[in-house]
Image (tube, grey):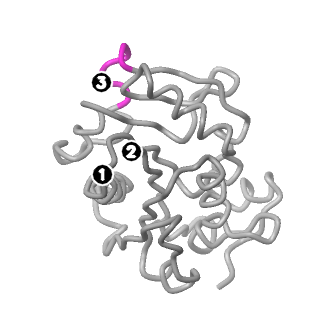
């Protein structure tokens, strides 16, 4: 079984608010990501912080399980959220996961399906646009186990780079590289800041 892991626990300080609550075409980044996963036929474990959790409508259990990262500022950073999400997905029977930061709202269902297809032959699958790797990152097998059993200070990048022979690159659209880190990035994709 495959599950999406939606990383939505960051506070988005450079953006002026949580990225999950930023808007594009009247929908929050969180809604957009859930929609792309849903269109690809994948249910999601969303890792959120308290403010995001309080600001979103109740989770639809057919589409999403929502878990709280109580300390998104922990030194483990985003990897702490990844580990929480992967643990919850594995507990629910997942043997493959697709990890997507919520700040990539232009990732499409086609991009997600391409990564799923890449996991047929690779332990790690990554979409590529114009020769550069993007998101979501797919994991299975030993790469998935490394997330749960990894040492302190480990990152997703470390896992991806550990063994190039287990990585499959798949063609993705431009959205796999269109991350939003600040207001300039947000304006570049036509989005609006989070509502305070």
Left or right position of 79 against 104:
left
Query: Which of the 4 image quarters holds residue 103?
Result: bottom right
Q: Distance of mark 3 from mark 2, alpha carbons?
A: 24 Å
Q: Distance of mark 1 from mark 3, alpha carbons?
A: 25 Å
Left or right position of 163 against 40:
left
Around disc 3, counting alpha carbons within 10 Å, would you say few (fewer than 14), some (14 to 19), or many (20 or more)? Answer: few
The reply to whether the magenta stretch includes residue 95 is no
The residue pinned by badge 2 equals: 1
Around disc 1, counting alpha carbons within 10 Å, would you say few (fewer than 14), some (14 to 19), or many (20 or more)? Answer: few
First along the sequence among labels 1 and 3: 1
Q: Are marks 2 and 1 in contact (CB under 8 Å)?
A: yes
Expressed as whole percent of the image width and height from the top left, the position of residue 77 reads 35, 57
Q: Distance of mark 2 from mark 1, alpha carbons?
A: 6 Å
| SS at badge 1 | loop
The residue pinned by badge 3 equals: 162
Mark 1 or mark 3, whichever is nearer to me: 1
- Relative height, residue 154 to residue 18 (above, below): above
Residue stretch in magenta: 160-166
């Amino acid at each position: 079984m495959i599950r999406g892991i939606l990383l939505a626990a960051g506070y988005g300080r450079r953006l002026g608010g949580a990225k999950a609550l930023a808007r594009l075409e009247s929908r929050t980044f969180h809604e957009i990501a859930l929609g792309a996963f849903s269109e690809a036929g994948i249910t999601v474990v969303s890792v959120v912080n308290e403010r995001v959790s309080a600001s979103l409508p109740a989770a639809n259990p057919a589409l999403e399980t929502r878990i709280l990262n109580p300390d998104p500022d922990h030194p483990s950073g985003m990897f702490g959220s990844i580990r929480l999400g992967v643990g919850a997905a594995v507990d629910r029977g997942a043997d493959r996961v697709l990890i997507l930061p919520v700040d990539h709202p232009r990732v499409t269902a086609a991009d997600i399906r391409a990564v799923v297809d890449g996991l047929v032959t690779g332990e790690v699958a990554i979409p590529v646009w114009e020769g550069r790797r993007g998101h979501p990152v797919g994991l299975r097998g030993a790469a998935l186990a490394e997330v749960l059993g990894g040492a302190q200070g480990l990152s997703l990048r470390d896992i991806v780079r550990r063994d190039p022979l287990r990585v499959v690159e798949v063609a993705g659209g431009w959205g796999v590289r269109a991350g939003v880190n600040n207001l300039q990035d947000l304006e570049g994709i036509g989005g609006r800041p989070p509502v305070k």
